[in-house]
Amino acid sequence: MDLEKVFTVQGILLILTGVFLLVMGIKVVIRQTKIRKQDLIKEGTVLHSRHVEQRDKEGFLTENYYELRAEYHDKGHRMEKTVYSVEEYLEGDTIRLVKAPDNGKDVFIYKEDKANGIGAWVWIAAGIAVILIPFIREALGTGAVSMVEAVFLLAIGISLIAVQVKEEKKSLNRISARIVEVLKWKEGSKTRGGKPVYTYYPIYEYKRDDVTRRWRGMNGSEQPSQYKTGTRGTLYWRQDDARLMEKEPGRMLRYVGIVLVAAAVICVYGAVVLAF
């Protein structure tokens, strides 16, 4: 193998890009592995809930969250911690907590994100594939590169389809909700035309387990007229991972997976054409 042909400007850029993707993916996987292996996820109980809110001169909410005092047991010891949530919890509610894997002291409300986990493995696979491209192209030719791309796309495509099918099997309850407030949130020091930029989030009121609760939606808008108090809609509660959502989970992962599988077939066809 002629390494001079591997380490061209294009080859070096590909390798560096692959290393970046690989490192980013590995960092996420290591963090998630620590959380599971070190028994950092704890089942807790809310002891006290305090609603914190603040308004501006126009009457918009500028602060809206819940300060929760929760207890949990860790290695036989009863522990208490204060955590913060945009979703209302009541005294006695069960809550999932996670200890920060970095120091084991900070505690947060745990919301498992399967998509983030899948994304990490996609980054790792993409990183390996991109790093190998310059070496495979030099050793085996362009056709072999197409085969590597095909295997990569096929693996990712099938994985995404499998994740989507698994997600669709989870129970999903529709909950009637109403917008009762609008949060006016300043995005750090971001400005436009010399003026601060605000994002507006709806505050929903809904009933779950015969108890009225409030929750700040996650989809914001820079247009204050986007959300109006009194507007009724539907929220989605997924019991399996205690997740509240504004939109019913779509089938985007399935469609992306199908596209990637089709792209893999095209890469195989291209490799065959180059070979013959």
Image: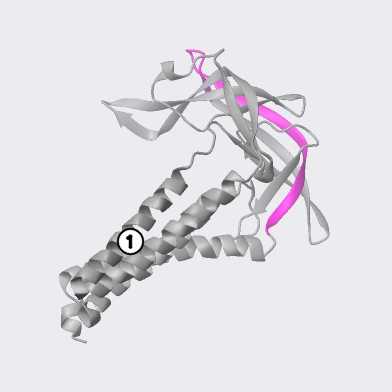
Left or right: residue 130 versus residue 62 is left
The relative height of residue 44 versus residue 63 in the rendered view (above or below) is below
**x and y percentages locating residue 272 in the rendered image:** 25, 71
Who's the residue at 64% across and 22% down the image? 176
Looking at the image, which is closer to me, 138 or 84? 138
Residue 24, visible in the rendered structure: no
Can residue 60 be found in the magenta stretch? Answer: yes
Which element is circle 1 on? helix
Give the image quarter of residue 188: top left
Segment colored magenta: 40-62
In the rendered view of the protein, which quadrant contains the N terminus? bottom left
Q: Main secondary structure of the magenta part?
A: strand
Furthest residue in direction front, as rendered: 276
User: Looking at the rendering, which quadrant does residue 38 occupy?
Assistant: bottom right
Q: How far across and how far down the image is residue 28, in percent?
A: 50, 60
Q: Quadrant of residue 153?
A: bottom left
Residue 159 in view in this figure: yes
Residue 196 percent coordinates (x, y): 35, 26
Rendered location of residue 113, percent (x, y): 56, 49
225 above or below 108? above
Q: Residue at x 42, y 15 (%)?
A: 225
Judging from the image, the colouring scheme is one colour
Residue under the point 29% across and 28% down? 192
Q: Which residue is mark 1?
A: 265
Identify which residue is drawn at 58% across, 44% down. 168
Q: Is residue 66 magenta?
A: no
Q: How many marks?
A: 1
* Mark 1 surroundings within 10 Å by alpha-carbon count, few (fewer than 14), some (14 through 19), many (20 or more): some
Q: Quadrant of the C terminus?
A: bottom left
Please give left or right for residue 62 compared with residue 45 in the image.
Answer: left
Q: Is residue 86 above or below residue 112?
A: above
Q: Check disc 1 and give the amino acid type.
A: Val
